[in-house]
Image (spheres, helix red, strand yellow):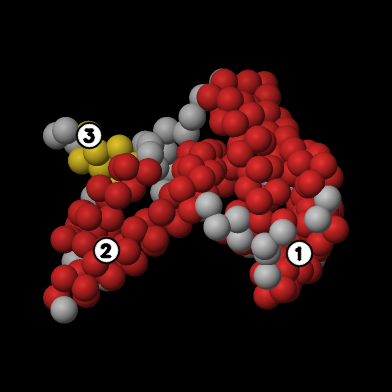
Amino acid sequence: MDNNVSSMKSLVAYEKIRDMILTGVKLPGTRLVLADLETELGIGRGPIREALMRLDRSGLVKNIPYKGAMVATPPSRKEIAIIFGIRVDLEAQLAVEAMNIITPDQIAQLEALHSRMGSVDADFYTLDREFHKIIYQASKLPHLCAIVNKLIESVETFLNLYRQEVTDCYKFSFEHGQILDAIKAKDEEQIRIVLKNNIQSGLEVVERSFSRLIRKPV
């Protein structure tokens, strides 16, 4: 029983620290001090240590000898471009696999999420992630879903530090509508096209952000 309670606390700590990193509350290079996290989260040090080890494995945190845990630096511009390229083929295949077995309930969830995206919800990025997650999980290929999640997670810190413009959100919402329509129509070719466009739109946001950083005066 005690082990179950400890595991639950560790999971809660993991999710809270992860969310602080992905939303930019904890910036790259920030030290994650156990005593501070204990106060912030109201969770004991044991579960927090376990959570930091898990975050280290995910790439969001680095445990450095004699320094402790720190928020990791996001991937380089070149690596992000490669990651997005890999995502195109893998995510399109998952969507195709999901196409013929997705349930009416999952379709309803996608429609509800897409409706919220249309109003440019303050939590747009979370809605975006959940939309794709539902599609990929519907494929019933959990190991490939885990690979996709890892690839997305590796660039999430950057995407959250340099948020999309409102016009980007409208564009992504339109593209999600196209994805949903293609899935309902069971149109494999169209699913591949619109998913590729949507993923490349995300890369365009990253590239634009990098360009702004390069032009930024020292």
Q: Is residue 24 left or right of residue 5?
A: right
The amino acid type found where label 1 is placed reads His
Q: Tell me the SS state at disc 2.
A: helix
Residue visible at 51% across and 39% down in the picture = 151
The amino acid type found where label 2 is placed reads Ser
Q: Which of disc 2 and disc 1 is earlier in sequence?
A: 2
Q: Tell me the SS state at disc 1.
A: helix
- Mark 1 and mark 2: span between their CA atoms? 32 Å
Give the image location of residue 47, x and y in percent.
Answer: 21, 62
| Residue placed under numbered mark 2 in the picture | 10
- Mark 3 and mark 2: span between their CA atoms? 20 Å
User: In this rendering, does residue 116 appear at all?
Assistant: no
Q: Which of disc 2 and disc 3 is earlier in sequence?
A: 2
Q: Nearer the viewer, residue 80 or 194?
A: 194
Q: Is residue 169 left or right of residue 67?
A: right
Q: Residues within 10 Å of mark 1 (few under 14, many from 20)?
A: many
Residue visible at 68% across and 43% down in the picture = 92
Q: Nearer the viewer, mark 3 or mark 2?
A: 2
Give the image location of residue 74, x and y in percent.
Answer: 47, 33
Badge 3 vs badge 2, beta-carbon distance below 8 Å: no
The amino acid type found where label 3 is placed reads Ile
Q: Which of disc 3 and disc 1 is earlier in sequence?
A: 3
Give the image location of residue 50, x and y in percent.
Answer: 22, 55
| Residue placed under numbered mark 3 in the picture | 64
| Residue placed under numbered mark 1 in the picture | 114
Residue visible at 84% across and 45% down in the picture = 190
